[in-house]
Image (spheres, grey):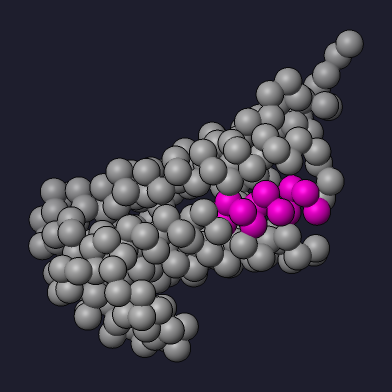
Amino acid sequence: MNMQEVISWLRRLINLDMRVFDEVRSNPTATIPGVVIVAAATFLAGIGGWLWWIVRGFGGSGDILIHSAIIGSIIAVVLWGLVWLGIVYVMLTQVFRERAYVEQLLRVMGLGASPLALMALMFIPGLSFGIGVTSLALTFGLTAIAIKSVTTADNAQVLVANALGFFVWAGVLTLLASSSLSSVQPHAPGIFLYNTTTSIAGDVVNFRP
C-alpha cells in the first residue's frame, strides 16, 4: 500500500476534488487502502467516543475502551462492509438493475467513509454532538458521490440505495450501543455512545428499589 498515494487521495477530498473517486474506482491497488481507510477512520471515531466518555466523567472508561473503541469499531467496520455496502450493491444491481461492481464500490466507499475520523474530536466540550452528527452527514454525502462514480444508476437511485444502507448500518449500531446499569458494554463507537447514556439514564429513572 502506497501511503503517499493514500494521503494524496485524502488531501484531494479535503480540497473537494471529487475526481479522486474516478481515479480510485479504476485502480485495483486501491482495494486494500479502501478497507484500511474505513477501518482507521472508524477506530478514530471509537477513540473519540472513549475520550468524550472520559471528559464527561461517566466512569467505567476501561469498559468503554474495550467494548466501544475496540470491539465496537471492529463490529462497525464489518457491518459497513456486509450491511451498508452490501445493501447498496443489492439495491443497485438487483432492485434498480443498474451496473455496479463490488470491488469498485469497496474502493470508493472506503475512501468516502474517511470523515468518520472527525469523531476523534468528540471530546471537545460543547461540540461533541455536533461533531458526531457532522461526521456522519459528511460520510453519507461523500459515499453518495462515491457510489455515483461507479454506477450507471441515476442520482435518485443512488440516494435511495445509500440511504437504506446507511440507515440499517446506523440503526444496528444504535441498538448495539444500548446498555444498562448492570452492564455497560456498548458495542458501537463514537456518537453511538449517546444511546448508551440514554439507556443508562432510562434505567435510573425506571429503577425501583
Q: Report if residue 109 is visible in the image.
A: no
Quarter of the picture holding the N terminus: bottom left
Quarter of the picture holding the C terminus: top right
Above or below, 157 relative to 95? below
Q: Of 118 and 144, which appears nearest the observer? A: 118
Q: Residue at x 28, y 85 (%)?
A: 19
Residue 118 rendering spot, x and y as whole percentages: 57, 67
Q: Report if residue 57 is visible in the image.
A: yes
Task: Tell me if residue 52 is in the magenta stretch.
Answer: yes
Q: Residue at x 68, y 24 (%)?
A: 183
Q: Residue furthest right?
A: 209
Q: Is residue 119 left or right of residue 126?
A: left
Residue 44 rendering spot, x and y as whole percentages: 55, 58
Residue 105 rendering spot, x and y as whole percentages: 23, 61
Q: Which residues are magenta?
A: 45-55
Q: Residue at x 19, y 64 (%)?
A: 104
Residue 37 rendering spot, x and y as whole percentages: 39, 63
Q: Residue furthest top?
A: 209
Q: Is residue 164 left or right of residue 194?
A: left
Q: Residue at x 61, y 54 (%)?
A: 47
Q: Main secondary structure of the magenta part?
A: helix
